[in-house]
Image (tube, grey):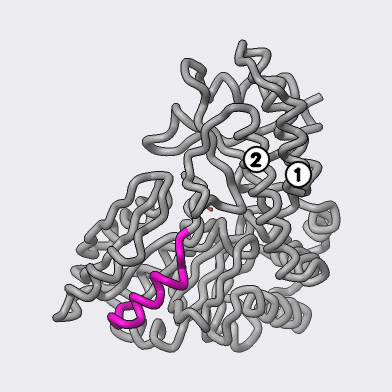
Amino acid sequence: MHEKQLLLIPGPTPVPPSVLREHSRPMINHRGPEFKALMDEVTEGLKEIHKTEADCLILTTSGTGAMEAAVVNTLSPGDHVLAVVIGAFGDRFAKIAEAYGAKVERMDFEWGKCADVAQVAARLQADTDKSIKAVLFEQNETSTGVVNDVEGIAKAVREHGALCIVDAVSGLVAIDLKTDEWGVDIVASASQKAFMTPPGLGFVTMSERAWEAAKTAKMPKFYFDLAAAKRLAEKGQTPWTPALPQLFGLREGIRLIREEGLDNVFARHQRLGRMARAGARALGLKLLADETCASPAVTSIRAPEGLEAKALRKLALDKYGVVFAGGQGQLADSIFRIGHLGFVSETDVLTAITVLGAVLQEMGVTCDTGAALAATQSEM
Ligand SMILES: *Cc1c(COP(=O)(O)O)cnc(C)c1O
């Protein structure tokens, strides 16, 4: 029964029925009054979620497109950029800047740990001639299930004066991000993670300082020209034909987030994260992320000694219809991940732990699923 699946990957995430229904609405004129009302409502919701008064632009693209837009609109070839890398997505951010000719200095941290704020601050303080133009980093590093101290890093970046550019694709909505209060210049995110909507839209916030940098940025751009997006947004339009079904769905996704209340959404993700970690530990499994920086959105788990993560995931899917994610990059073979962001409930995490216990036992690993469920439940 393959239609009955429990999708527990860190994006795309499950989509509520009311959002799916919105996707089947008839098309409207994207230069007409109904579209303007839609754009205005969605943009206002996005700004509220980002906790910003700055511009928030909507692009038809995946998260990577939003990251690329952030880079090409504010930097020039040859610019010195500091990329703080704690996993595969931080690595991607560095590569985007490199692809457009930035001089990228990487600051790598061990996968499974968050960036050391003091080390980032020390590097920036050492840059006395202010050659570093921008700092790129992740809010939530999805490949390892680790959250960075965005407030702490942003503070160090502010003191230096470089642009602070954050990839929040898998963290936004699940984890608090106070864009304006923390002084983040650009937040790049996307529709298919905690927004509970399908893939297809990217979001980019632009502070005054970011627009200032945009005036002299020489990296090539056309589709992702944010100045054009801003000009059209002021008229309630987009430069190019927007993904209308996605926007109908996003309006409903935002409505659901407001109905639950953003603080309650954050608390639910915290709870789901604690449940997943407690359950996995009680099954005798080792977690990749340090508890101090473990993500409320995704939990990365090491496969037991001598057992392939891939085989474990295959059995969970084939026999139980539960979809866990694999590892990425250097962790491809050694870990698997449980996504618990967006339209995910406590019941889903209890199911995930049940199935994980069953699969481990069937693969010859001794574990106590009952005890693991009790441990999971105790974090509810
Ligand atoms: C999912 C994700 C992205 C975006 O990936 P796309 O496939 O381009 O949507 C970027 N950064 C992080 C941290 C992510 O989790």
Q: Which residue is denoted by mark 2 in the rendering?
A: 278
**For the point 59% across and 75% down, which residue is it?**
50
Q: In which image quadrant can residue 339 be found?
A: top right
Circles 2, 1 touching at the beta carbon (< 8 Å): yes
Number of labels in the image equals 2
Residue at the spot 46% in from the left edge and 84% down from the top edge: 207
Residue depicted at x 68% and y 61%: 195
82 left or right of 49 in image: left
Q: CA distance from mark 2 to mark 1?
A: 9 Å
Residue that mark 1 sits on: 378
x and y percentages locating residue 376 in the rendered image? 72, 40
Q: Position of residue 254 (x, y in %)?
A: 74, 68
Locate the N terminus and report the quarter of the image it occupies.
Answer: top right
Bounds of the magenta span?
A: 148-163
SS at mark 1 in the image? loop
Q: Position of residue 148 (x, y in %)?
A: 45, 60
Q: Residue at x 56, y 56 (%)?
A: 170
Few, some or many residues within 10 Å of mark 1 (<14, 14–19, 20+) = few
Would residue 8 be found to the left or right of residue 291 on screen? right
Image position of 167 (left or right of 75)? right
Give amino acid for label 1. Ser
**Which kind of residue does numbered mark 2 sit on?**
Ala
Residue 42 lies in quadrant: bottom right
Q: Nearer the viewer, residue 237 or 81?
A: 81
Q: Is residue 121 visible?
A: yes
Vertical position of residue 244 compared to residue 300: above or below: below
Residue 160 within the segment the image draws in magenta: yes
Q: Is residue 43 above or below residue 67?
A: below
